[in-house]
Amino acid sequence: MTDIEQFRIDIPQSDLDDLTDRLARTHWPSALPGAEWSRGVPVAYLKDLAEYWRDGYDWRASEKQLNEFPQYITEIDGQRVHFLHVRSPEPDAIPLIMTHSWPNSIAEFLNVLGPLTDPRAHGLDPSRAFHVVAPSLPGFGFSPFPEPADDRPWDIARVARTWATLMSRLGYERYGAHGNDAGALVTPQLAVHAPEHVIGSHITSGLGVPMGDPADFEGLTEQDQAELTGLMERFAGGSGYAPYLTNRPQTLSYGFLDSPVAQLAYLVERFKEFDGWPEGAAPAEPIDRDLLLTNATLYWLTGTGATSLWPYYEGAAAMPIDQTVVPTGVSHGGPSVLRKIASRKNDIVRWADHESPSHMVAMAVPDHVVTELREFFGNLRK
């Protein structure tokens, strides 16, 4: 099947009423004394967020915002694929496929779509514009798995092949690719799968992190070693969620599909943990609360909080692959030692060490992402 059908989000009111009712009937646990964030999401924090979700957050406003962007559905390799396809008014715009992170959704890109596709309307140079394709990963949002699910794993390589088919189906022969987190795994894999079509691979962080290969440490100076040690110390510890998900994702699914607060707590903890907050404390929320809840509501309303865990079971608990078949750009890439390590196995033509208060960079500092994409792909075109 190669049909592409228009899609519009229209959630039944009964589903929203059910969400409100479940939030009102939450059974709240006792709070550990003095634990703050070091033993999980604090009860007071989550109560406040859940109360706002129930009484203050407006899904219909978010639904309207999402529906301002053209959306479509197609079937590839037996999988329903939902995607935004926002064409630029600029005739020489670069096609760009953007892959969202985990645990996130297409909501991740809401604040960058306008400046990327219509820079003239945002006071930017119109010569660096994009036609953006932003799919929902299989098992996420409006790309749910069929029931029963396909026995073949939806690993990163299969997603990359699917994205290549999608771009071909849309008529794009040459295009750029960008991704964050899970998307940063898909993006270089897509480059390797379709180097004759991908003009450049751009990701936010992930390259150059040593994964046990002794060669990664060869030739490093004392300053390099100190930078690397500091980075590892910052992200040491954590909840240990990754080993659990690679073995037992089904167990968490029951709570996620029955309790919106259980799902919300998990999503919030991942956002905070990925930000590298220190033991016992967490910074002020770097992401707009409504945007955070739009992501959580998408998970709840589509029933994909559980299936979004499957990439870890399918081997996604890793770092982006190295590749030299197309140029690589990295934003929010971390200290220079990571670039030194990554450059040994990647053709890195741009590396920016911007600071972001969140691992969900496009949500927290969308202007950074817009600038980096325009610079990286604009320079490739020269």
Image: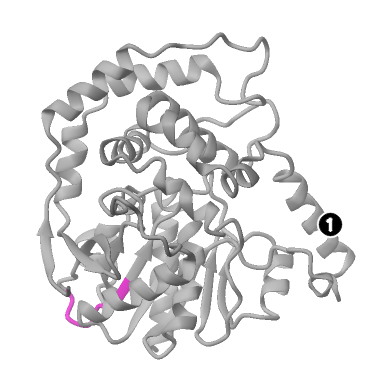
Look at the image and tell me whether residue 266 can be seen.
Answer: yes
Instruction: Quarter of the image for the C terminus: give it.
Output: bottom left
Residue that sits furthest to the right in the current view? 222
| Horizontal side of residue 231 vs 161, given as left or right | right
Residue that appears at 15% across and 72% down: 89
Q: Is residue 267 above or below residue 231?
A: above
Q: Is residue 274 above or below residue 320?
A: above
Residue that appears at 36% across and 32% down: 257
Residue that appears at 62% across and 67% down: 207
- As for residue 94 lying within the magenta part, the answer is yes
Residue 362 vs residue 208, the one in the foreground: 208
State the image coordinates of residue 141 (x, y, percent, origin top left): 30, 48
Q: Is residue 33 above or below residue 65?
A: above
Residue 357 vs residue 181, the one in the foreground: 181
Name the element at disc 1. helix
Magenta part of the chain: 90-96
| Numbered circles on residues, count | 1
| Horizontal side of residue 92 vs 315, given as left or right | left
State the image coordinates of residue 179 (x, y, percent, origin top left): 44, 63
State the image coordinates of residue 262 (x, y, percent, origin top left): 44, 26
